[in-house]
Image (tube, grey):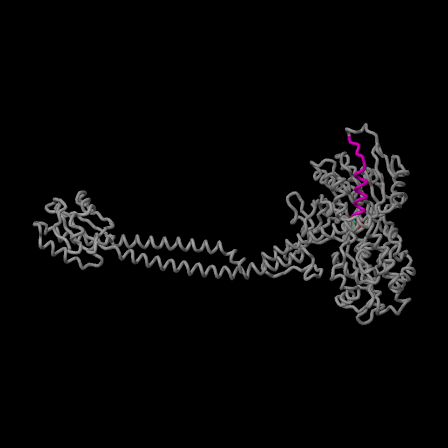
Amino acid sequence: MRTALKMVLPLIVSVAVVSGLFAWYQVRTERRILRSDLARRAEILGESLQESAEPLLDHAPNKNLQKLVERFVEREHLKGVAVYDPSGKMLAITPGIATAFANWPSVVKDAAAKDKEEDAFVREKRVDSDGKETSLTLHIQACPLHRDNELAGALALFHDTDYIDVQVAHTLRDSLVNALVQTLLITGLALILVRWTFMRPLSRTAHWLRTMRTGTANGVKVLPGLPQGQGEIFDQIHQEVTHLARDLNTARAVAEEEARLRDTGASLWTAERLRVSLQNKLHDSPLFVVSNREPYMHVMNPKDRSISVLVPASGLVTALEPVLLACNGTWVASGTGSGDRETVDRNDRLRVPPDHPSYTLRRVWMTDEEDKGYYEGFSNEGLWPLCHIAHTRPVFRPEDWLHYQRINRRFADVVLQEMEGTESPILLAQDYHFALLPRMVKEARPDARVAIFWHIPWPNPEVFGICPWQRELVDGLLGADLIGFHIQTHCNNFLETVDRALEAITEWDRFAVNRQGHVTRVRPYPISVAFPENPPTEEEELRNAGMERAQICEELGIEASLLGVGVDRVDYTKGILERFRAIERFLDQYPAFQRRFSLVQIGAPSRTDIERYKNFLDEVTAEAERINAKFHSGRWKPIVFLKRHHSHEEIARYYRAASVCMVTSLHDGMNLVAKEFVASRVDDRGVLILSTFAGAALELADALLVNPYDICQLSEAVHSALEMPEAEQAKRMHWMRRAVREHNIYRWAANLLSDLTEIRIETAERTEAPQSQ
Ligand code: G6P
């Protein structure tokens, strides 16, 4: 109550002052009106008396004149009337004022002197019969009197003005009472309003903040929820504060983790460690990333033109986002969302992530024709099958190659534009879409440190030699100071390709290529995910796999006591058909698992404008339907094919609910689904079936490693996974989690960027200096 009173005190004072001023103004106006009213009445009376008195001015003393003045004495508020001759001698006067005004007052004298009506309010001092002095305010109306057009005297009317003071006093009293009542009412209402509208939500917010800060309520560790529905402004404040509090909590968790790691002597890479390390290494030179796929896509609903945000299904995006979040910078990518143009500024930039802006996304545009040639054609019908060797024939069209070159140039120009004004910038180019870009950037900015990371496999030189423009591609890549692949085999394949395709010195002993004096290092950097370091929340601890599974089955309308999960873009390299066929064989071989086990296949439709992909999507759908038709029974079916894009949060639920996760790629650079599944199993349960043809197999040796072309082996692996004792699951998962945790995305970025920053750049001014490596 005291706080509320303090809050409304300025209001009370203001209301009181305003009401007081208003009362004063009212009183002043009232007095002015009453006085001018009196003056007007006196003037009229004076004029009529003037006419009656002038003919009687003959003799003095004049009885008729005396009678005339006495007749008027009864008038309201009229104190008396007097008539004077031009010398000021009284000719007639009413008795009440005879003593006080025996001589004419100055205003009457003035009227006679100026021969014009005058009036004045005068204060008269009087001594009564007891000798007591009183004062009286009078209004005197003076009119000159004439006889034969000559001034013959003056007439004076004396009005008592006391009644004006009385009336004004009443008005003053009423106004003050009004002001008081108003002040009290407004204060009361303000108090109620402040208490209900502000004090309650504010004190709840304060309580919530305290709990958030200390992380405890009544001694129990909690992360309190946001008090909602207290009014728009409070909800906004709450939201802002939640972000702030979340940041503080994260910072606290990071600091605790850092301290813990220092204490145990472990060397783990965290977002914070990466940030600090890069700050030291980069000396504030900003980080630039260029990739074809953007991390946030804005999609416009054609019906109501509302725009929503989508995180595309891309291993590259999954991996790079945490790096950008850790070190700010600019990510250049193609704007392919239908609402992308609506959401950028006039420089085609925007800050992302949308609800926690931390770095800049610069969008680059291309026409449908360019997209068809560069993205669909050369990148995805040419390089993708070429590098994956998944038995889809690569297609190389000369017109696609032209588009590929043109778009590489466009992106290089945008990158160079973004780098303007930056000394020794660092560029991390991404993937097979930009093989030509490193040289383009390096030629214009020799001071830039340029790395390119190839996210897909690099095949052997015979296979790569199929590409009619292999020389140009390899030469473009060799413009970089550093080329990264997931695994050593890809590095070896690349060096062999260089050997065959170009004039260059391949230095096998230090894994470098010297082409025309410029040295490019070639190294393996196994990409990864951000392993969540925060301890599981109370909610996560409560929600076990069984509960999650039951809920998912309910949502999907199926009955199954064991779930498997597969998460892929629907791509012919992912071995989805092989996976389905292995499930069919498994159910044939082990019928006891029928009506018990279902595989949920999350399949994000991908590159569907390409014939091969469209057909493949149909093939996968048909295969799932065929197998389901063969086995389904009641509410159970062996395969649930969820043919749509799912967010990371949605996918995480399936990972947690599954007994087994199937990654059966026919060939894959790394495959981050395998690592995401492992990272999400805080309960140390679940089995990973992993293709030996995925780069991840080298690090996740505790998965059940399979050859996806071998359907029998794959089906046996499903059986082993579902029969695996919990202790063994826990042991395997423990080791896999350790591997992913230690080799997380921050370590990937730290190794790559640290190697890049250690490279000595030989710019024009320093060409004489010896090479460091
Ligand atoms: C792979 C590639 C990425 C690509 C992703 C999704 O992971 O290495 O560069 O972004 O597939 O493919 P998309 O064509 O949809 O970008």
Residue 87 in the image: state x and y as whole percent.
Answer: 13, 44
- Could you say which is closer to the camera, residue 505 or residue 375? 505
Work out which residue is located at the far left of the displayed protein and give it: 59
Residue 95 in the image: state x and y as whole percent.
Answer: 15, 56
Range of the magenta residues?
745-763
Q: How many marks?
A: 0
Res. 540 image quadrant: bottom right
The answer, for residue 667, to whether it is visible in the render is no
Residue 514 in the image: state x and y as whole percent.
Answer: 86, 35
Q: Is residue 358 magenta?
A: no
Q: Is residue 525 above or below residue 760?
A: below
Res. 688 image quadrant: bottom right
Res. 443 image quadrant: top right
Q: Is residue 474 left or right of residue 118?
A: right
- Could you say which is closer to the camera, residue 166 or residue 410? 166
Residue at x-position 19% and y-position 54% = 45
Work out which residue is located at the far front of the displayed protein and give it: 130
Q: Is residue 760 above or below residue 37?
A: above
Q: Is residue 316 left or right of residue 667?
A: left
**Magenta stretch, main secondary structure class:** helix
Residue 410 in the image: state x and y as whole percent.
Answer: 73, 40
Q: Is residue 746 magenta?
A: yes
Where the C terminus falls, by quadrant? top right
Work out which residue is located at the far bottom of the displayed protein and give it: 634
- Could you say which is closer to the camera, residue 772 or residue 180? 180
The answer, for residue 34, to whether it is visible in the render is yes
